[in-house]
Amino acid sequence: MFLFHYIIDMNDIKELINSEKLLELFEKYKYIILILVILVALLLIRFFLISEQTITEVIKDEKPRSVFDDSIIYYINLDRATRRRYYIENMFRKNDIVANRISAVDAQLIDIDDIKYKKYFKPHPEGLWHVSAYDYYKQDPKHKGHFGAFLSHMKTYEIFLKTNKKYAIIFEDDMEIEDFKPIVNAHYGYIPDDWDMILLSYNISHEQGDAGKFQLENNILKINGNFTSMGAYIIKRDAVKMLLRELEDHTWLIDGK
């Protein structure tokens, strides 16, 4: 307070306020003062608007990632499997899911020797259990069910690529789900950005062992080995293109034994 009084005496300020000279100055420059007040008000308004916009953008950027934002959902179902269709469609409704039906390729109607399937049957001495895919499917009529599942997923991929969506969520019609979206959203943040496929269902052969092939972190299991079963999964567009190309020469069942 001593320094303040030393620089500006409070009595001088009171005398200045009460003086007629101050009123004269105000009257003389009142328009300039008015303009300055308006400018300051405008600057303050602009500042608060920009601050509000910035806060909104930050909140928007911090919105949790959701794979459902740019995805399309499919389910694979045989035309003759009407009970399964009824069951899974009812389950989708309970989970607030809108899914597109894919008419599955019926293994009972497949002719393995049809020329259109030739591209899938290339000889592999070290392939499926040391036989070619063709020989395996010919060994037992029931084996063709694996081929029908394979062709159904390939069909789904081709249909998906005709859309502009980034992700496909694919179900087979025997899957069971509950609280699907909340559970996926709760765990999706732990998935690395460079993922290709998120398995929601899978089978692992005990013959593989587990040394270094499976890593569990944040309830996310990373599979570094082989697996079967494509009952439910999420897949990126680029991964679909890769599988359509690479799985033509298939030596591993897409469906479990």
Image (cartoon, helix red, strand yellow):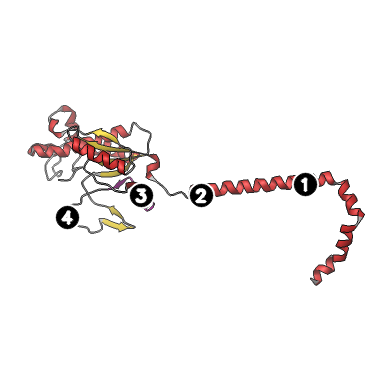
Measuring from the top left, give residue 41's x and y in whole percent: 71, 47
Say which label, 4 or 3, has the lower sequence index.
Answer: 3
Comparing labels 4 and 3, the label whose residue is closer to the camera? 3
Disc 4 target residue: 206
Label 3, on which residue? 182
Quarter of the figure with the N terminus: bottom right
Q: Which of marks 3 and 2 is nearer the N terminus?
A: 2
Residue flagged by tag 2: what amino acid is it?
Answer: Ile
User: How far is disc 3 from disc 2 in space, using C-alphas?
Assistant: 20 Å
**Pointer 1 or 4: first along the chain:** 1
From mark 1 to mark 2, how far is it between C-alphas?
Answer: 35 Å
Q: Which amino acid does label 3 sit on?
A: Pro
- Which circle's residue, 4 or 2, is located before the other in the chain? 2
- Mark 3 or 1: in front is 3
Q: What element carries label 3?
A: helix
In the rendered structure, which segment of residues is drawn in magenta?
A: 182-200
